[in-house]
Amino acid sequence: MNIYARLVYRNLRANLDKASLFFELIFPLFFIFVQGPAIGGTGLQLNLGGKIVGYAEYLATGAVTLTVINGGTNAGTQLWFDRKNGMFEQLLMAPFTRAQYILSIIFATLIIGVVGSLLVFAFAFPIVGAGVSFTIQGQLLIAAALFLGTMFFGSFAITLSVALRSSETFQVVSTFAFFIFLFTSSVFFPTSTAPPVIQAVSFANPLTYTTDIFRAGLFDALTPTVSLELTVLVAEAIVMFVLAVIAFRRIRV
Amino acid sequence: MTQDGTAIRVERLSRYFDDKPAVDGVSFDIKRSEVFGFLGPNGAGKTTTIKMLTTLLPPTSGKATVLGHDLATEGRRIRERIGVVQQQDSFDQGLNVETSMDIYGLIWNVPKPERKRRIEDLIRRFGMEEFRKKPTIDLSAGQRRRLQVAREFIHDMDLLFLDEPTVGLDPIVRRGVLDYLKERVRDGLTIFFTTHVLEEAEYLCDRIAVINQGRIVEIDTPENLKRRFGSAKAVEFKLLQGSSQDMASALTILEGVTHLVQDASTGAYRVTTGTPETVIPGIYRIAERLGQTVSSIYIAETTLEDAFINLVTDDNQVDAKAGGE
């Protein structure tokens, strides 16, 4: 078996907290089935690149990309479990390189993020189904959004977990950081209608781009800015991945 | 392995942390199928040496070859052929004992049928049948240690680093582990072994290096170390009235006493000295002054522990003098 496959399998088996994972999947369902229909019931509608969608559909797609953040947090948790339990050093004394180890965490995170998003999407489908247009271009955009979003947030979580000195601090800080990402993105509302400060922050927020690209792909609602958003998201994911690798190399053993 | 049968060759290897030497120019060779003990007080540099030789930590200076591969440039080749039992715990918290061994074997690319066979053998050899399905997070410290040592034998290796592997094990399990290690050495395994239990070192090791303050003080066989450095005698005695803090305080300043150990369970004192003929009357004088009675006293056989204490104590005194000059 390939070296990455072995390490990824081990990460998924050994370091996944199944209870946390379950609740990470349940969490977006509340937005899809409770908040979305409740606010959508007021008749609120939004314009996505010329396509009008109800708020319930809008929020349901945002909830799918919210799963990407949850998947990303898992990268930091995996690293913390290994550091806390002595497996980090143990694996570095096995025939693997540090790069292979960190990539195996990223790959495991991608699996969690993408599979989790698809699961949540399957639940959300009855709500968003009517507006969905599956085109090849749209599916590529969906795949890119989920891949790049998970890559960014996985790398971010790894960087954070290296910088912080305890797993407890990591949990608190990552939850706080991810709330900032969440509420300054277009997951819950269009950032164009937000106050100027939030609009400014949202321009740097990769979750905004992940969500916008995902929606554009899903509803085939391409705006002129989609390619620019995709470029920014690629750049942010690469920069964050490089930062994670640099941080990781500096872990003292 | 090199053609001359050397498993590890270390030349002036050093590691500094913030300009302070943790390991300071150590040199030694370890032969194939040898059990090499690495003894030293806490903070002497044992674990740092292991971390360097297992490629976890780059040396600040010096060079080494491990199994014929250069430490600086062939880390991956070295790691393919070594096993390591760290001083700290290492376990996969989401798995049970059996699965954790299986996945450890998988990441080492051991074929499934072979993994299965080895797991059964190791579970039996290390007495883990009762807790083979227990999650690793719920194991006691001793059980977890047993798993950690056993798990390392899932994969093939030529050289095994054991950093205090028997901490937390009860005496019966400990002896079982040591006997298993001896068996594997007979099959050709080389072992680099650190411990604070000197009886273990004496039982297992072919040669022992004593390291203190990052420098190797002496390398020899256990027998030679005892003969050469165990010249100081150990005087053991008990007081009729039980142990006394005043007695301990007085003994530490008694001329000729180089080391004092008090056994809390038996109340016995063990005094290391080069001059028992003056120390024994001194013990009686102190006891009389404190209103105590010496109930038993004898000169004990020299142990590896005595030799170790002498070596480290002498080295510290040399250092202290050098620092004072």
Image (tube, rainbow, N blue to C red):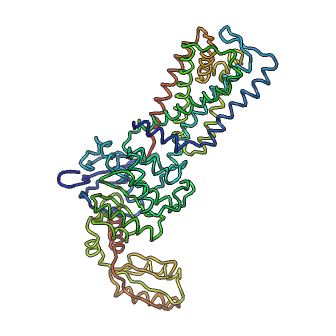
Q: Nearer the viewer, residue B74 or B159?
A: B159
Residue A44 pos. (x, y %): 78, 16
Q: Quadrant of the C terminus of chain B?
A: bottom left
Q: How many discs mark residues in the rendered view?
A: 0
Horizontally, residue A144 falls left or right of residue A187, namely left
Residue A143 position (above or below residue B230): above
Relative vertical location of residue A50 with respect to residue A244 in this rendering, above or below: above
Give the image location of residue A193, x and y in percent: 72, 15
Query: Residue drawn at (40%, 65%), measured in percent from left and top?
Result: B177
- On the question of residue B98 being in view, the answer is yes
Q: Residue furthest left?
A: B4
Query: From what the image shows, is residue B34 above or below residue B232?
Result: above
Toward the viewer: A91 or B302? A91
Residue visible at 57% across and 20% down? A142
For residue A135, side relative to residue A131 (left or right): left
Query: What x and y, as percent, mark residue A190?
Result: 69, 17
Q: Position of residue A79 (x, y in %)?
A: 51, 41
Which quadrant would residue A175 be assigned to in this image? top right
- Determine which quarter of the picture holds residue A64: top right
In this view, the residue in front, A184 or A45, is: A45
Side of B218 where B245 appears, left or right:
right
Q: Is residue B5 above or below residue B169?
A: above
Residue A192, quarter of the rendered image:
top right
Residue B149, visible in the rendered structure: no
Q: Residue furthest right?
A: A42
Q: Residue at x 29, y 51 (%)?
A: B13
